[in-house]
Amino acid sequence: MIDTTRSSRISGFHKKSPAERLGIVSDFAGLDAAAAARLSDTGNLDLSLADRLVENVIGSMNIPLGIATNMRVDGEDVLIPMATEESSVVAAVCNAARQCYDAGGFTTSMSGTLMIAQIQAVDVADPHAARLRILGRREEIKAICDGCDPVLLSFGGGFRDVEVRVLDSQSGPMLVTHLIVDTRDAMGANAVNSMAETLAPHISAWTGGRVYLRILSNLADRRLARAHAVWPLDQIGGEAVRDGIVSAYHFAAADPYRAATHNKGIMNGVSAVVLATGNDTRAVEAGAHAFAARSGQYGSLTRFEVTADGQLSGSIELPMAVGLIGGATKAHPTAQACLKILAVTSAERLARIIAAVGLAQNFSALKALATTGIQKGHMALHAQNIAMMAGAVGDEIDRVAAALVERGTVRQDIAQAVLQDLRGGAAGA
């Protein structure tokens, strides 16, 4: 039955303090004191900072922060902070890195730090001629764009080029101008958006059209991170495992239904590092999935093949628009600590490490699928979550989880029965 006595129209909610907002929400939702106390516990994020990072704050959602070990990237050993709530993600990276560590670990590269801003113009009478008019004003465009961000210029960034496309659409031809901007150690959204908005009136005057959208593209295909590794047969279990992994990759490359899950596994690792460093997980995920569909069919972000001497070779290439300055990356103390753990001094280095993590994550998932199946490798960690869901606490969690794994069935109803027997036995003792 619908409760018509409650209203989500709360005047001045944004002007209230976090504590006042929490009180209103608690009354609205009928939260008890314990639930309200958990929401007000923001962990290592100061409540006043949280209130400045996003709107209408009442608390924070604390995510476990784990460390992946065994990672060697471009000859340097690194520890990888990963923020995730999903079991086995951190362990998967550790295991994959260990199995290629003695073979040199991961080698990486980056295509650059270029971002794209788009300016959409419509109702242009002569779009192809207008395209040439814009291209002919390159130096003028450069001066306008570089004038928007002298700080970026001082760090060696700024406008690099202009491209113009005539795009057929359901509402007729659109003239789309791309500003190519080097954002250096910033993710770059604010910089390129400012340039697009400043240039927009000029585009309208030069083309005679009306400008609508002026915003960056998250398909950052001028900012590709790449990683490669070789896994020796004696580390992964022989030729049968190698061939199973390659076959699993071929499945993802051929079938979008499989590729979606295949790439989701990659992003388990990628997004965990992006989040830990205070970067924009949604932007990175959008760019990765758009890049995976660039051929017209959604496919794999990784490739697996066999080397001349029979070892397993894996590689990954995906857009990686991350930064070291601006937003939560600079403001969030945990993000700053994670960047220090990674010992990165440039956005490029961070992007390359993240690509290596994505490849490691994918290797582990494919190996599990090609051998024991994903559930068996995942079971022990997942069983702990189910044990907690059943109400187990303290030492009970490990004991209930072990019983579930031994039975080979990880379900909450069984966990509850095991826990009841365990507590009954303890009471009887």
Image: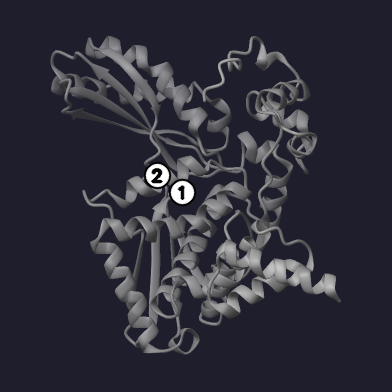
Q: Is residue 308 visible?
A: yes
Q: In this rendering, would 399 be left or right of 1? A: right
Label 1: which secondary element: loop
Q: Residue at x 57, y 53 (%)?
A: 272
377 or 111, which lies in front?
377
Is there a contact, CB below 8 Å, between mark 1 and mark 2?
A: yes
Which of the image's four quarters has the C terminus? Answer: bottom right
State whether residue 360 is above or below residue 35. below
Task: Judge the density around disc 2: few (<14), some (14-19), many (≥20) Cα neighbours within 10 Å.
Answer: many
In-front residue for pair 175/158: 175
Query: Is 148 on the left or on the right of 216, as rendered?
Result: right
The residue mark sitting in front, 1 or 2, is: 2
Look at 56% across and 63% down and name the residue there. 89
Q: Position of residue 118 (x, y in %)?
A: 34, 28
Distance in Å between CA atoms under marks 1 and 2:
8 Å
Q: Nearer the viewer, residue 203 or 364?
A: 364
The residue drawn where x is 74% and y is 31% is 49
Q: Which residue is mark 1?
A: 320
Question: Which residue type does callout 2 highlight?
Answer: Gly
Reading the image, the residue beneath label 2 is 287
Q: Which image quadrant for residue 7?
A: top right
Q: Amino acid at mark 1?
A: Met
Question: Looking at the picture, how far across and down is residue 278, in whole percent?
Answer: 62, 43
Asked whether residue 96 appears in the rendered view, the answer is no
